[in-house]
Image (cartoon, helix red, strand yellow):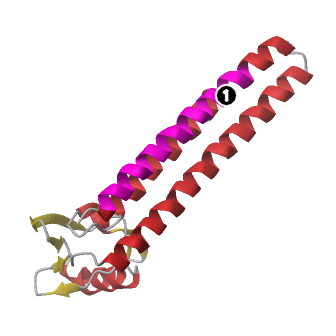
Amino acid sequence: MLEKAREWIKKAITHLETEFSKLQLGRANPAMVEWILVDQYWSLGPIKNAASLTLLDSQTISIQPWDRTLIHKIAKAITEENLWLNPQTNADGIMIKVPPLTEERRREAVKIARNMLEEAKVWIRNARADSHKFISQAEESKEISEDIAKDYERDLQKLVDDANKQVEELFKKKEVDIMKI
């Protein structure tokens, strides 16, 4: 009966981890840009589907599109995403030098991370509300007894509390990582 809640909570935590990996921390990471949508052959798709992304060093990402006609489209998409990145194009691809974070950008990144945390908590609350509704309906239709419904509610709350604790810990680690010079 709590399988849907577990599934949604797991998705919320995985999504939060993915979003945290996209935050720029003054060092290069292909995950920062691979998800950006670019117009490829009359449809939108992530950069990772149109190019090879590699790290040249800890500060530089190299993007080598499989079709050179996409170079300027990819560079434009990265610029428009407002990630504090400045892609440099050349004949074969795109180079991105990741600038070191200033104190102001670090604080801004923490705010963004906090918003991501709140979004994950909303997903968790929605999973709890949906499961609670399902449990209540099962109890009202006499599919389960009142005692079993209370057991499910207790288990659901424990699941939600554990998930909230886990996302808070993820945020705290990310905050320390962002503020570390």
Viewer-proximal residue, 128 or 92?
A: 128
Q: Which contiguous range is marked in magenta?
A: 152-178
Question: What secondary structure characterizes most of the magenta part?
Answer: helix
Q: Can residue 175 be spotted in the picture?
A: yes
Magenta stretch containing residue 160, yes or no? yes
The residue identified by callout 1 is 156
82 sits left or right of 90 in the view: right
* Quarter placement of the C terminus: bottom left
Image coords of residue 16 (percent x, y): 46, 52
118 sits left or right of 63 in the view: right
Judging from the image, what secondary structure is the residue with disc 1 in? helix
Image coords of residue 177 (percent x, y): 30, 57
Residue at 21%, 78% in the rendered image:
99
Residue at 33%, 56% in the rendered image:
176
Residue at 22%, 63% in the rendered image:
29
Relative vertical location of residue 58 with respect to residue 1 in this rendering, above or below: below
Which amino acid type corresponds to the residue marked 1 in the rendered image?
A: Leu
Quadrant of res 142: top right
